[in-house]
Amino acid sequence: MESGKTRTPLAIAIAAALGAGGLAGSQSLQPVEAASGGEWGLCPAFGPERPAYQPLAEGEPGKASADRAEYGTDGAVTLIGDAIVDEPGRRVRGERLIYRQGPEASVSAEGNLWLQTGDMAVQAERGELNLDTDAGRLERAHYWLESQHLSGVAETIVQDDRQHYRLGQATFSTCPAETRDWEFQAREVNLNRETGRGEAWHTTLRAGGVPVFYAPYLNFPIDDRRQSGLLYPTFGNSTEGGFEYAQPYYWNIAPNLDATLTPTLLTKRGLGLGGQVRWLHQFGSEDLGRDQLDFFYLPDDRVEGGSRWSLGLDSSGRVNPDLDYRVDINRVSDDQFFQDFSTNLEQSTTSHLRSDVRLNARPGGGWNLGLLAQRYQTINPDLSEYQYPYRIMPRLTASNRFGLGQWGEHVAPSLSVRADVTRFAHPSSERIVGDRAHAAIGLGQTFDDTWYRLRPQVTLDTTSYHLNDADPNTIDGNRAFDTSATRSVPISSIDGSLFFERAYGETGRYRALLEPRLYYLYVPYRDQSDIPLFDTGQPTLSYSQLFRPNRYSGGDRIADENALTYGLSWSLIDTQQGTVPLSLRVAQRYRFEDSETVLPPNFATPETHPSYREAGGSTVLAEVYSDVTQNWNGSFTAEYDTDRERVSRSQTRLGYRGEDNSVLNFSWFTREGINESDRDYRQGDVSFAWPLSRRWSMLGRVGYDFESEQVVQSLLGVGYESCCWSARLAFKRYIVRPDVGADLGDDAEYSNAVVFQVELKGLGGIGGNQFRDDILGFDP
């Protein structure tokens, strides 16, 4: 018997029903790994023993087989004894199948009925399916969906047509049938594939046989279309907020607009509302904009009194191919907000929140124009207003590069132009403010080939200031600043590199890359002591920093240099594994003359200033990285002060990633103070997630400041994993003082928190991603 039509299997009703599993409105069930390992490695073989099945390929004719067949006078064919009806994509198998031909062909079955697809298996006592309309009914059905590791039962499964399904007395879970640690039960489920929505009545979640959740009515998605609905809640507990419960609701407002609203209960502080709004919008026919608003609002804080809030806006877009923008706004209600509401050490010790607006334009002719406005909210109460950062209100920039044609067979040098005008403002009347205009014109030429690169360049850097007179009774007013200072500095450099490559191993598996590099820099000295510092500082030294023309950041200081930087980098690459067994970089700048340009305050004897650089070899910088094995990797960076003959700064990292989700991180940071008022820094950090057995694991992190002899942050917890669920519980303690780098003393203020997470495998987790944030590389 053959059938030339390919029809939708009734089993799709069961697959669609799995959408009822989550409370989530915007999240769909994700594919899982095979039961033999990975997420389901603790599970027994999935599903019962069932007949082997190899689906027919699309387009193949249908076929039927049985021990014997009986033909009725009405055209019905009864297949008896291991009866099978195969069509592409599905199989119906039973002890007795009745196939009725006619305008609406149908199959009815009794006795150990199996309906199978490539991913789904359904066993029922009896059933009937219209092969033309796909309407049908299964009774007392058990189903298994292998890709989701989901299974359950239903008293009845009714398919009205290809788009509408009804299930009665249905259950499902990812747990084995013999040990249902958790299970959803629903009295009635209706599914509409046309709208992508489902409805369930009287739904109960049972954990360990005990009802823990009940909903008289649920409306949920059954496909990947975004749908409004409840997301998984988060729980927590902290010293500052007490017990915390947050219940997010996802609102699918429009195809390009959605929001997540999160009512949050903190038992110590009250009821607040957090959320996130996302918006995609279009400029013209091609260019897009993206906006995201994050907020939290607590109308009445029971502890501090008054309202507490935070606001973050990230908006960016391209108005047209030649114009784009970026808006980044970050604000909080008060200095203590992060200390009271965040369990993240980095946030709770933040001193400044930056907000800025950027506009970039490309009007043509190779020009790039920019507009920047930037200000900070200082939330460190230990800083006086005088110590707040300057505001850029605003900055205009312009840059271009001009080719000067050909010199015979060679490309002529290129001319580069960079210019900016900045207005600096400050909230304190004690600080000097004003305008700075800067322009740099450079002439350079690049000669290169596969084995070398050489670039000589000369630049004229000019800067002028127009500053307001400071009050003579203030700190800045007592300093000898020139309100109309100007500075012109010629900068000459030549940068050269050689490239060597060699293959190792019989098949050339390993490739070694060697790059020696020389960089000569000459910048004459200019007295800049009468110029204030608006945006200038001394950045952390790096390998690339040694090959730049100015050791200072910003535009208020240009360091004089007559120096040669020599560096060497070497890397060994495993082309088969895609790893770097070893990478080394080392560089040093040798000064032929003292570099006298220093940062304020200006000492009576400049040679003793921390930023003064004497002639001779400077700090040696070394960087090492290694993928030691497929599981281990490490890095090391060190600055060696040749004058003081000591390591002035170092950073060591070592990480392990195991196949069983075992994670180990070790880091060690040191920095030597450059004078008596500058505190030495020595801090270590260890974090781990380590299996103790197949089911139990230990989680932890500790950060320790060896100078103040205090724990900066700590976390200790346990994790448990079963076949179909997992849970993690940890206690966390962290410093909430604004500046960890300060002398903490014995009265350092700590906050304590309880971190909790439960995951029903295949559906999602409750409790957020706190462990992923605290333990680098941990992916529960």
Image: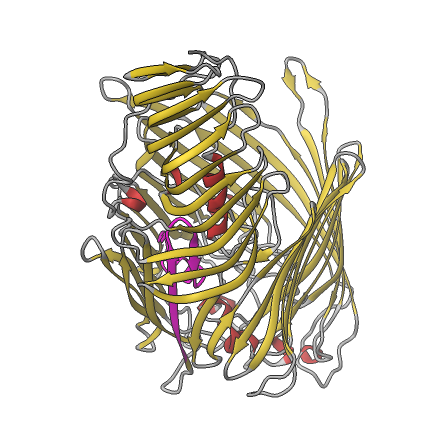
- Colour convention: secondary structure
**Residue 401: x %, y % from top left:** 71, 34
658 in relation to 329, above or below = above
Query: What residue is shown at x 22% (from left), y 56% (from top)?
Result: 695
Q: Bounds of the magenta span?
A: 751-780
Residue 696 shows up from this direction: yes
**Residue 580: x %, y % from top left:** 32, 36
Query: What residue is shown at x 34% (from left), y 39% (from top)?
Result: 33
Query: What residue is shown at x 26% (from left), y 17% (from top)?
Result: 507
**Residue 440: x %, y % from top left:** 70, 45
Residue 683 shows up from this direction: no
387 in relation to 393, above or below = below
177 in relation to 333, above or below = above
Which of the pair 317/705 is nearer the observer? 317
Q: Quadrant of residue 755?
A: bottom left
Say if the magenta span includes residue 764: yes
- How many discs appear? 0
**Residue 325: x %, y % from top left:** 73, 48
Drawn side of residue 545 relative to residue 427, left or right: left
Q: Quadrant of residue 127?
A: top left
Which of the pair 300/467 is nearer the observer? 300
Say if the magenta span includes residue 97: no
Task: Assign the N terminus to one quadrant of the image.
Answer: top left
778 in relation to 491, above or below = below
* Residue positioned most to the left: 693
Drawn side of residue 4 relative to residue 206, left or right: right
Which of the pair 239/220 is nearer the observer? 220
